[in-house]
Image (cartoon, rainbow, N blue to C red):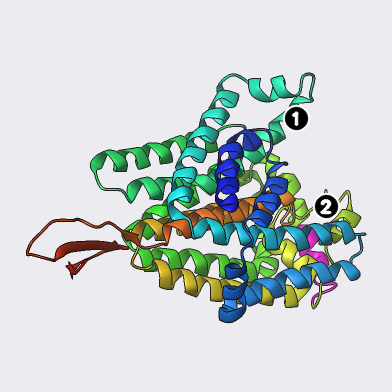
Amino acid sequence: MIGRAARAAFLVLLPAFGVGGALGVPVLLCLVGALCLRPSLLRQAVEKRPLWLVLLALCAALAVLSSAWSEHSAGVQALKIAVIIPAGLLFAAAAADDPRLTRAGAVAGFAMLALLLAIEAVWALPLNRAAQPGGDFDELSRNVSRGSSLCLALIWPAAAALSARDGGGWKLAAAAALAGGGFIALQFGQFANTIAFAMGLAAFLAAYLAPRLGLSAVLAGLLVWLLAAPFLTPVLLNAVPADAIPYSWNARIEIWRYICERILEQPWFGHGLDAARQHMPAVPVHPHSASLQIWFETGVSGAGLVAAFLVAGGRELVRRFSGNRPAAAAAAGTLAALGAVGNISFNLWAEWWLATLFIAAGLVGALGRARVWLAYGCLCPGRRPIEAHVGTATLRGEYEP
């Protein structure tokens, strides 16, 4: 009961924290995750030991361990990762086990966050300026940039939850949610969010029409790019004419070129956690690409583990969601959108970004639960009809009360 109330409070507070930059979200997530801890969750994890969970634990362990050979003093960051990942898993598992609350929270949280961000976009950040009087405009702009990326994680499960309900009005509401998300993605001069929304929308629609194929295609794309990023990036950058690339991306291009060269210096275990901070000014803080960051910090060993996690986790997603159009669409849209942003913009280990990934996992997981409605009526004495909707299948029969 405490965990459920904590999750409800978290979803209520999420829009306010999101529009303010999302930096407080990981603290809330860790607190709620701790309150969601139940012996049954731990027992299931120990007894079932799903391969994707084992691989995720190995990925996290390698990232933490790499702080030992990092060129940067990364002990504090390693500790944060060791805390956030278990807390995030607890939150996601509990959220998925409480689908009704989580789906309602996804819709309400997205609607409120989109509204707050729309106010910021139309009236030049009035909420952030009121919260931080005299604050630097660039810093306030970074707040809404992070908030709009958090919004990208909420769009797809919210739209899927609305589309899963019967009636044309709910389908229109889902379309309106997608349109609202598209409007937010076009704001604040964040070209990365615009690209991510376009990719997420294409994946969402494809998986809705063909759940297994659409979701598998997105997972395959993420896997191929992860494995090929250090080798394909220089080739692609050399093949694209310089005048075809937006001027604002020049800094990213130089960072990616530099990182690809440095990866070859420590190919097996990488330069260590957060090592890019020692390569300033060539690399300002992080590589601006999750795939390149994994290779740069943990080398072939880390890239191989993450690839194995994507394969194992992807197989589980496809198995669970291939018969559930809304859930498959939400999963595909979320993976495509956040995968795009993660490979263009943010530090993989930023606490708010890790929290965003686990929030998305919990919201999408709640859509994968079987939806069952019972229609009562007396067809014959002592028997009642039952109609169950599981994914896209409808099962009918009778049972004796």
Tag 1's secondary structure? helix
Q: Type of residue at label 2?
A: Val
Residue 264 is inside the magenta segment: yes
382 to the left or right of 123: left
Expressed as whole percent of the image width and height from the top left, the position of residue 225 reads 60, 66
Please determine whether, in this image, residue 139 is positioned above or below residue 275.
Answer: above
Expressed as whole percent of the image width and height from the top left, the position of residue 193 reads 58, 43
Residue depicted at x 60% and y 47%: 6
Please determine whether, in this image, residue 153 is positioned above or below residue 211.
Answer: above
Image mark for residue 283: 2
**Quadrant of the rendering where the C terminus is positioned:** bottom left
Residue 16: quarter of image? top right
Q: Earlier in the sequence, mark 1 or mark 2?
A: 1
Residue depicted at x 46% and y 57%: 366
9 to the left or right of 238: left
Q: Which residues are magenta?
A: 257-267
Q: Type of residue at label 1?
A: Asp
190 to the left or right of 373: right
Q: How many residues crowd mark 2 within 10 Å: few (<14), some (14–19), many (20+)?
A: some
Residue 156 is inside the magenta segment: no
Asked if disc 1 and disc 2 are in contact, CB closer than 8 Å, the reply is no
Count all numbered tags in the image, as a single digit: 2
Q: Is residue 104 visible?
A: yes
The residue to which callout 1 is attached is 138
The secondary structure making up most of the magenta span is: helix
